[in-house]
Image (cartoon, rainbow, N blue to C red):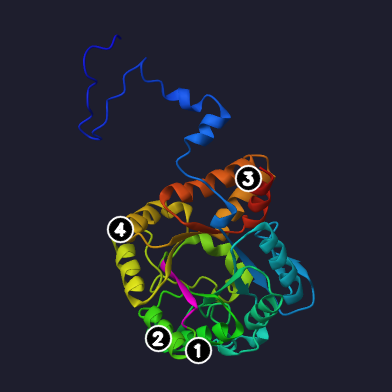
Amino acid sequence: MPFNGRPKISSRTGTPAPSFPTTRMRRNRRTDWSRRLVAENQLSVDDLIWPVFVHAGDEPKIPIPSMPGVVRYSVDALVDAAGDAAALGIPMIAVFPHVEAALKDPQGSNAVDPDNVVCKAVRAIKGANLNIGVMCDAALDPFTSHGHDGLLRGEEILNDETVEVLVRQSLIQAEAGCDVISPSDMMDGRIHAIRTALDAAGHTHVQIMAYAAKYSSGFYGPFRDAVGSASTLGKGSKATYQMAPSNGDEALREVALDIAEGADMVMVKPGMPYLDIVRRVKDTFGVPTFAYQVSGEYAMLRAADERGWLDGDRVVLESLMGFKRAGADGVLTYFAVEVAHRLKSG
């Protein structure tokens, strides 16, 4: 169709309406250099946070059957692994414990022991002078004999009493050298309480990444195997403190509260099923926003790759780009190390 006069203007976007053959969208896609030149989003090693599991035994690496390729590290082996991650340029690791059954009780007492496996791991990593940040979870589920993130009275999860324990847990982690405290419990008011306690103890430099919008999801199963809470929680539900998957506006209220209480960064968990929440959080608040590509997402992609149903290398990168396109500043992913190798090699 020949061009006659001025191009029609789209009332929706205010830009010229597409007109073929003058407008050919494929021109910019024709060559590799052009595709790279016009790319709207970039994925780099700087976007990756690597979640790792640590145990107190001597076995260097214990495979996790429901997460093929992921292991529980001994403290010494974790230091080596953290060094490898640092050499790749990964900015931060997130340390999660596997706690022996004998150390678990209803109060999660081991969570506030300065010599627990998390604190030992943090001290060892920091003592190695690696150029990498260390994030620690503030939650009780790996440490409780019932598998919940908080203290129980009958069937009720106690909010304020749990927050008091989380404050103590956060303080010992900060004293061990943790750089970022990441409360994942979803108790009301815990960000303010932890921030206040950290500042009062002189840990004003310690950052908080809040699990601000954490959903009661079916995608956490392999993680619970990894930290040993699957057997203790059983068929128990976390629906009274984690968010309902049906709700989006509620996520914005949760994020707003955590920012007001002192969170430096916020997180949406799980990741891929909640990309709309990532986008809304970033657009609404403009704060550093992260997503967690959780264990169930990892297990699905890995299993499909192992069976030849998907091209694993391709879909992993595509999934991570999806987080970036949705507005995430970074992603917690168990694929971090292999993705970093891939990005480094081009």
Q: Residue at x 65, y 44 (%)?
A: 305
Query: Who is closer to the viewer here, 284 or 213?
Result: 284
- Looking at the rendered image, the disc whose residue lies closer to the viewer, 2 or 3, is 2
Asked which secondary structure carries label 2, the reply is helix
The residue identified by callout 3 is: 304
Q: Quadrant of residue 285?
A: bottom left
Q: Mark 1 points at which residue?
A: 168
Of the two numbered discs 2 and 1 in the rendering, the one whose residue sits closer to the viewer = 2
Principal secondary structure, stretch drawn in magenta: strand
Is residue 210 a member of the stretch shown in magenta?
A: yes
* Distance from Cα at disc 4 to Cα at disc 1: 32 Å
* 3D distance between C-alphas at marks 2 and 3: 45 Å
Q: Nearer the viewer, mark 4 or mark 1?
A: 4
| CA distance for labels 2 and 1 | 12 Å
| Residue occupying the point 35% across, 16% down | 20
Q: Which residue position is annotated with label 2?
A: 196
Q: Pick whichever of labels 2 and 4 is earlier in the sequence.
A: 2
| Residue type, numbered disc 4 | Thr
Type of residue at label 2?
A: Thr
- Asked whether 295 falls inside the magenta stretch, the response is no
Q: Mark 4 points at which residue?
A: 284
* Residue 294 as seen in the image, left or right of residue 163: right
Alpha carbon distance from label 1 to label 3: 42 Å
| Location of residue 210 (image quadrant) | bottom left
Q: Which amino acid does label 1 sit on?
A: Arg
Q: How far apart are marks 3 and 4 (CA)?
A: 35 Å
* First along the sequence among labels 1 and 3: 1
Quarter containing the N terminus = top left
